[in-house]
Image: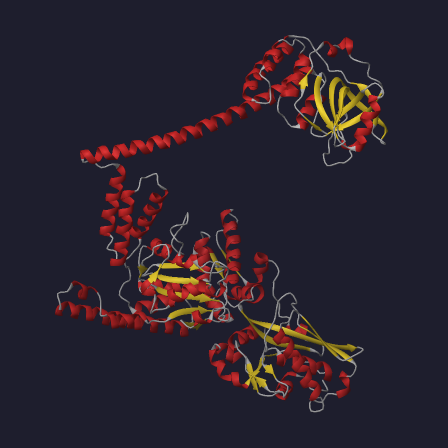
Amino acid sequence: MSNTPISVDRSPETNAQNIPKIPDALPVLPLINTVIVPMAVAPIVVGQERSVKLVDEVMRTNRLVALVAQRHLEARPAGPDDIYRVGTAAIIHRLLRLPDGTLQLVVQGLERIRILDFLQTEPFLVARVEKSPEQVTVGTELEALRRTLGELFSKLVPLTEDIPNELAAAGEHIGDSRMFAYLVAAMTPMETPVRQEILELDAVENKLQRLIEIVQQELAVRELQKQIASDAQEKISKTQREYILREQLKSIQRELGEENAEQAEVQELRKQLEAAQLPEEARKEAFRELSRLERLPAISPEYGMIRTYLDWMVNLPWNTTTGEAIDLGYARQVLDEDHYDLERIKDRILEYLAVKKLKSDRAAALVEQNSAQSSSQENSQKPPEPLLEDIRREPILCFVGPPGVGKTSLGQSIARAMGRKFVRISLGGMSDEAEIRGHRRTYIGALPGRLIQALRRAETADPVFMLDEVDKLGRSFQGDPAAALLEVLDPAQNHTFVDTYLGVPFDLSRVLFICTANTVETIPSPLLDRMEILSLSGYTEMEKLHIARRYLLPKQLRANGLKPEELTITDAALQRIIREYTREAGVRSLEREIGTVVRKVARQIAEGAIASTTVEAEQIPDYLRRPRFLDEVVERIDRPGIATGLAWTPAGGDVLFVEATMMPGRAEQLVLTGMLGDVMRESAQAALSYVRSNADKLGIDPKVFVGKVVHVHVPAGATPKDGPSAGVTMMTAIASLASGRLVRNDVAMTGEITLRGKVLPVGGIREKVLAAYRAGIKTVILPQRNEPDLEDVPEEVRHQLQFVPVSAAEEVLTTALTPANS
């Protein structure tokens, strides 16, 4: 059912004396988005088949029906639970059948009724009802409410197009407060639930009070709409008037020889550009844009864009440098103060700085020589172009290693050693080329790329610029940031780097770029070709102890407001934290655990419980709770078919367990689990094929595999694993299972296996050996061709471990498996 605007009948038929008697049972006609109040006359349209039957039935009798609003609008047809319990008894005055089968009714509300229960639901709803008369308390309060509502309603009528203006005057002559309340409720715009709420209120005073709130809110909304429209029109007129007046003012000022504020701003920009010492090409572009700015009105959108562009041009450090003369002795001192060990990395950094110092000295000498030979200003300002090319051809250092080994802090140390500012931007997840090259100025909110932004913040053209997480660059439809970095990191090109926003070259050759990455595998090859890789592997336990003692503990004491004499942590306690609470290549987790201990002691001191303390090894669980890591290698190797391997991860080396078992099956089959990659699956297949084809030579009964399913599993199944270096470990686990011989608890291995039983070299030897050392391994089996890689292993680790270089699978099994009679 739908409805059109409602009116209230004030004819004599609505007087109480002429209202028909309301029977105890009435057909119920549900209304959608409509509430018919008593004494209201309104047209409604009936279209549902059930409702048409209801109307036909009542038209043959007394034409009385219960009109009740529908609670759940989506119900078709509505049931007893879908309608309200309070409605209006109404009489149908007129019926018109339309060509489409629907009925158009004119109904008049008679009395408010309440549904007690339903007598039938088919073919239409019939309910037992009772009259629900409103409570009227005659008094001054009721009259005051009625008059207040009348005044508000008379204000609302002129603002609402749907309400006839005559109703405002007619409402003043209605003395019945109940009738007046229903008149306002019927004509005021409101939601159906709100109109139903007013119908259900028993006291007329409450109806009037609620209606006053609704009409006041509607008045406020209407007046606000009118004010907004008026303000908008006034603003448009004001803008047009201001434009005309500004143009007139410009003409007058030109006649009088005076300048306005805009012209003063342009003149100030001109002075700043002249003082900025821009390169020639940048200078031409800046003054070209300044000329355009002079011809534009301030209200033009382009005015703000050009003003912002010139502000960038003025504030960029085109020729500002802060670098000091390189002192190699001081540089060595800074590196030693900030970093423990890393001798190979420090030596390479010092070599880099030494070469840079020699080139700078040579360039300065040639400049001085040219100045003496020629009075040309250009020749006296810069060295010859061939020498500039030599200076630019410096490699880009890229520190590669697991998290927490000191890559970022190395960059900070280099900046301190050179007396330069340090700037860092993270490239992790960057997938928009405009982040590097900048956006076109035509875009709203356009900015230069992040390199130019960082240089403006640094206020110098020669900072140490660290590009962090270069291995985590993304790529999307917005371009490839790695391709944009090719120009930035190429010493032969970056002296003419053009940011899209600036549109002119900016010399990046004076910037010392340093990159960091966790792995080189994901760095794009063209980008990797422009870098010199310096690998930082994990630290040994002794190195971590020295780092904790010299750097981490003092740093945490300062961060938590403690003095060195207030807290002492013994070496044994630090070693316990390293062994039992961290297992990482770097020292970030170690620093967090030390920080936890320091904070707990700081709380005790702040509460006055202690004045100072010394933390011993046996007290560590009191601060850090139970240990997180235990030496589980011995516990894991408790039956044949289990072998310990070594794996490389971006976070450093790790110990890898391989488990193998056999079970009867309908056909011989190899099952692999543990989230293994394709290469690792192929290694497992090659290992099984080798063991089966050489069973006699290995002392294994060839029939042991007949009719059996071999299942190889690598625990930590939620972690993806791939690569060929676990081939030797899988071969050892399968051979152990087939021969019934245990694999030694203190042995770990790595290497690729072939079908001939050859052991091929693999990568990441240093990280894998350190992982074996941290796990308590005593013997490491590795490919013979990887033996030279042991030079990268710290000396203290080499002395603690036994290394067995092998070239064939038989040598692996001889070392790894326990004797047959054990």
On the picture, is 263 further left or further right than 518?
Answer: left
Q: Quadrant of the N terminus?
A: top right
Please give the name of the residue rendered at 58% of the width and 74% of the height, measured from the top-left corner. Answer: 647
- Residue 258 point in image, percent of width and height: 20, 35
- Residue 379 point in image, percent of width and height: 18, 66
433 or 30: which is nearer to us? 30
- Residue 799 point in image, percent of width and height: 51, 80
606 or 214: which is nearer to us? 214
Number of labels in the image equals 0
Q: Is residue 406 visible?
A: no
Is the image coloured rainbow, by chain, by secondary structure, or in one colour? secondary structure
Q: Is residue 754 visible?
A: yes
Please give the name of the residue rendered at 74% of the width and 11% of the height, measured from the top-left corner. Answer: 13
Q: Quadrant of the C terminus?
A: bottom right
On the picture, is 351 further left or further right than 165?
Answer: left
Residue located farthest toward the front when viewing the structure as drawn? 99
Residue located farthest toward the bottom when viewing the structure as drawn? 697
On the picture, is 430 further left or further right than 758?
Answer: left
702 or 645: which is nearer to us? 702
Q: Report which quarter residue 437 is drawn in.
A: bottom left
Q: Is residue 190 above or below residue 703?
A: above
Q: Is residue 108 above or below residue 716?
A: above
Q: Report which quarter residue 554 is drawn in.
A: bottom left
- Residue 443 point in image, percent of width and height: 41, 49
